[in-house]
Each structure stands twice: as structure tokens, then as C-alpha cells.
Amino acid sequence: MVLQILSTVEPDMTATASKNFVLVHGTAHGGWCWVRVADRLRATGHKVFTPTLTGVGERSHLMSADINLDTHIADVANVIKWEGLEDVVLCGHSYGGWVISGVVELVPDLIGSIVYLDAFMPKDGELGIDTQSEGAREAVKKAQAAGEVSRDAGSAKRYGLTGGDLDWVDSKLTAQPIGTSLQPIRMTGARDRVPKKSYILASDYNNPPFVACYEALKSDPSWRLFDLPCHHDVMVQMPGELSEVLVEVA
């Protein structure tokens, strides 16, 4: 097992050759949430892609009943294919863990490093609604019963954000398509075969499913573990430290 906690010594982010980063957002967010991380990585010569998943963010006008987990997996896999990317550092935040788990099944030979950022790590056959919080499950069921195709974003206050950060994120959040919670994921073990695998826990958020993933991986020497002392939206609260970790695991 390699368990790594960030030290106070800042590594040289320019020491690594240019890498291809694909950063996948979580529920109700969009590619916009990565701007602080993306700017830092690009400033040191890396290529960074922050796709917004269908139906949210600037693509919220595409919301429909047809959106499911496969839609979001294809969103990201197609960026990798059409941009001609190889040896990708694929990072998924929160719900984005579901997405990257499916992406690596579609383009396994193009992924060099996979990173779960305070994220779900689904198993074959699971549905999102099986692993969500009680509040999220109830929101999905309520939307279903009402014949709606999405659930309200709520406020990022629950992610521990305050002040200007809270105002910024709340102004950008959009409804989440419920179809993504209702389709089982199909996995064949491609994730396990990725050469470099990492999990980053936001220890101040302390969400049981994420803590459980982190703890379970401690016994697996093929994973690197990191612990950042912040709440859930790590890319908002600790973009510098997160950028350093991403370069480290690349």
C-alpha cells in the first residue's frame, strides 16, 4: 500500500513532462468548476479538458428524459477519441466517479492514470440510486413520481462552501438528470488494469460512501491514497494542492 498525505513542501509542477488531463465534474456542476485547477495545469504546459456532461451547465438546454449514465460516459469518451488523446489522466469528482468508471471500459488503452476525487467507485451492476444519500434518493423518486426528468441542484452549502465561493458555485449549479441514477453500470475490470490508480479523500466532508472507498483501498497496493483537509468541492477550496496531486499521479 502506498498511503500519501500531502506535505507542506510544494513540488515543482513543471518537473513532469506535459500530460493530457480530462477532468469530469459531479452532480449538477459543469466543466466550469475546474477553472482554478485547469488554469494552474495549463500554466505549467499540460493539456486540460473539462467536458460538461449533457443536460447540465452550459449544456442544460439539452436536458431530456433520454439522458442516462451511458450518455455521460459517451460525452467523456468522445472527447478523448476526437481530441486524439493518449496516456490520459482521467479524474472524476463525486458522481463523476461513475462516469470515469464507464469511460475506462470504452477506451482502456487510452487511460494512463485514473483518479477518484472524493468520488463514488461503483461495482458492476450497481445503480446510482443504490449508493446515493437518502436525500438524493428521495429527490430522484419524487421526480420520477411527478414525471419529471431532473432533480433540483440544491445549494453548495451542503458541500461546506461559504462566502464568495458559495455564491459563485450556487450561481452555476443546474438540475441533474435522474436517468443517470437509474441505469446500472456495466464493468468488466478495466479500471483494475489501469497502470496508475489513485483516490483523493476530502477528509473534512466525511461522506460515508467516499470514506468507505478510501478505507477499502488501503489494503490494495496498486492504489495511491491522498487526504486533503477540505470539504467536497476540492477543486474550489484547494485548487493548488489538488493540481499538485494530479501532476504527482500523472
Image (tube, rainbow, N blue to C red):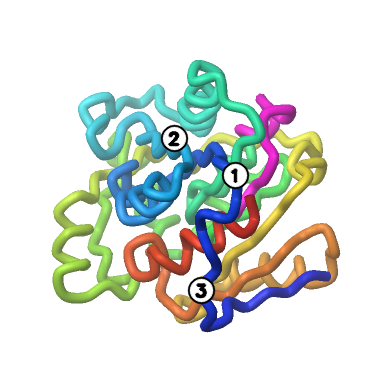
* Residue kind at label 3, given as amino acid type: Glu
User: What is the crowding at mark 3: few (fewer than 14 residues within 10 Å), some, or many (at least 20)?
Assistant: few
User: What is the crowding at mark 2: few (fewer than 14 residues within 10 Å), some, or many (at least 20)?
Assistant: many
> First in sequence: mark 1 or mark 3?
3
Question: In the figure, 241 relative to 105: above or below?
Answer: below
Residue 211, percent across and down? Answer: 61, 73
> First in sequence: mark 2 or mark 1?
1
Report if residue 3 is visible in the image: yes
Question: Do callouts 2 and 3 mark residues in contact (Cβ within 8 Å)?
Answer: no
* Residue kind at label 1, given as amino acid type: Ala
Residue 136, percent across and down? Answer: 40, 57
The residue at 61%/32% (across/down) is 103
Name the residue beneath numbered marker 2: 179
Label 3: state its secondary structure: loop
Report if residue 206 is visible in the image: no
Which quarter of the rendered picture does the N terminus lie within?
bottom right
* Residue kind at label 2, given as amino acid type: Gly
In this rendered view, identify the residue nearer to me: 53 or 183: 53
Name the residue beneath numbered marker 1: 17
Q: What stretch is highlighted in magenta?
A: 103-115
Name the residue beneath numbered marker 3: 10
Q: Does the magenta stretch include residue 107?
A: yes
